[in-house]
Structure formats: structure tokens, C-alpha cells
Image: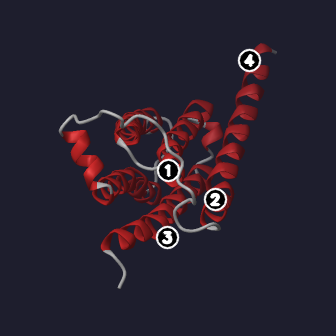
């Protein structure tokens, strides 16, 4: 019989993490459709990259290291920062370009999934969560690599490849497209 903890880890690995990547890709498609490079531009595109990097940090830590108080604190801090940047992003973009219903729907996943994943990580690592809450932090700050990444030996390379195709490359393309438009605009202003 499969243990509940294993089911929750599999839910994280094989359902929630891929959905987060797909939502990121859908968001990128919405940015392309609204021609982000001609309105909110490079600044908003860089905010998207910041948010992706923010969430990548706890994902990689939890995939490759034993979760301890330090990792939980990083996960919580990153989640808070991600929420602040997400708010700043929408505040910046909304007066500059149309945010479609499809983009708002993608944002609902991109905003809620990190919280759900954080809560599941805390439940799966309940003894560590109790140490965090009771301030029993002694010996809980050294990063210890797990012998094999969660999901088996092929999960991490496949997931990282999936994220490269659906999130990293599209947002690099968006940054380059926005940078090109920004430089063209500056060049036009200088003429």
C-alpha cells in the first residue's frame, strides 16, 4: 500500500509542478498575444523572469536536498517575495496593456500553486514544520543533499527539460524581444 506521504510527494511532482509550468507557458502566450514588447515592455518582462527564478529556487532545493528549517524558511520567504513581485507586476502592467481573461486565469494558477505546494511541502515534512513553528532550529541549517532526487533518477532531468521548453526558453525569448523593442525605441528617440 502506498503511504500518504508518497502520494503527496507524487501529487507535487507529477501534477502541481507540471501545471505550474503549463500555466507559465499559457501566460507567455498571452503576453505574445498582447505584444508586450510594444506596451509594458522590458520592465514587465524582467518581472516575469524574476518571478520564475524566485519559484525555481525552492523547487530545486526541495528536489535535491532534505527539507529542514532553513529550506522551509527560504520557501516561505520566496513565496512572500513572489506575491509582492506578482502584485507589482499586475499593478505595473494593467494600465499599459490589456490583461485578458485567459491571462487572469493563468495568473490564478501561477499565484495559488506556489502556496499550495509550500503547504504540501510543510505537511509532507511535518516534523520539520513543527521544529520551525516551535523555534527548535538547532542543527537545521546545513544543506544535506538527498542521495537520489525525488521522483527517481529520470524525474529531475525530465522536469528541468520540460521547464526549459515551456518556461525558460519562452521567457528568454520574451526578454530578448522586449530588449530589442526597447533598443529600437531608444535608437528612434536618439535620431
| Mark sitting earlier along the chain (1/3) | 3
* Res. 14 mark: 3
* Residue position marked by numbered label 4 in the rendering: 189
Determine the residue positioned at 51% across, 42% down.
57
Residue beneath disc 2: 166
Q: Position of residue 18 (x, y in %)?
A: 52, 65
Q: Nearer the viewer, mark 2 or mark 3?
A: 3
Q: CA distance from mark 2 to mark 4?
A: 35 Å
2 and 3 marks in contact (CB < 8 Å): no
Tell me how far mark 2 sits from mark 1, CA to CA. Answer: 16 Å
Which of 8 and 185 lies nearest the eye of the viewer?
8
Q: Earlier in the sequence, mark 2 or mark 4?
A: 2
Query: Which of the marked residues, 2 or 1, is nearer the chain's N terminus?
Result: 1
Q: Nearer the viewer, mark 2 or mark 4?
A: 2
Q: Secondary structure beneath disc 4?
A: helix
At x 73%, y 21%, the residue is: 186
Residue placed under numbered mark 1 in the picture:
59
Instruction: Return the disc, 4 or 1, that comes first in the chain's sequence.
Output: 1
The answer to whether marks 1 and 3 mark residues whose Cβ atoms lie closer than 8 Å is no
The answer to whether 53 is drawn above or below residue 13 in the figure is above
Q: Indicate which label's residue lies in the foreground, 4 or 1.
A: 1
> Where is residue 122 drawn, in percent x and y?
30, 53
Estimate the x, y position of residue 121 in percent, counting from the top left: 35, 55
Determine the residue located farthest toward the top in the rendered image.
190
Amino acid at each position: 500500500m502506498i503511504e500518504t506521504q508518497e502520494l503527496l510527494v507524487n501529487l507535487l511532482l507529477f501534477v502541481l509542478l507540471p501545471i505550474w509550468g503549463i500555466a507559465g507557458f499559457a501566460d507567455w502566450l498571452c503576453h505574445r498575444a498582447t505584444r508586450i514588447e510594444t506596451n509594458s515592455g522590458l520592465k514587465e518582462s524582467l518581472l516575469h523572469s524574476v518571478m520564475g527564478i524566485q519559484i525555481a529556487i525552492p523547487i530545486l532545493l526541495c528536489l535535491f536536498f532534505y527539507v529542514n528549517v532553513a529550506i522551509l524558511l527560504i520557501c516561505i520567504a520566496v513565496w512572500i517575495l513572489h506575491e509582492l513581485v506578482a502584485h507589482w507586476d499586475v499593478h505595473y502592467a494593467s494600465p499599459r496593456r490589456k490583461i485578458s481573461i485567459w491571462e487572469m486565469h493563468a495568473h490564478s494558477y501561477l499565484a495559488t500553486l506556489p502556496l499550495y505546494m509550500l503547504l504540501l511541502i510543510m505537511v509532507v515534512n511535518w516534523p520539520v514544520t513543527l521544529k520551525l513553528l516551535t523555534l527548535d532550529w538547532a542543527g537545521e541549517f546545513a544543506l544535506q543533499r538527498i542521495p537520489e532526487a525525488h521522483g527517481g533518477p529520470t524525474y529531475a532531468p525530465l522536469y528541468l527539460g520540460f521547464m526549459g521548453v515551456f518556461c525558460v526558453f519562452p521567457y528568454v525569448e520574451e526578454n530578448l524581444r522586449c530588449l530589442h523593442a526597447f533598443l529600437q525605441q531608444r535608437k528612434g528617440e536618439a535620431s
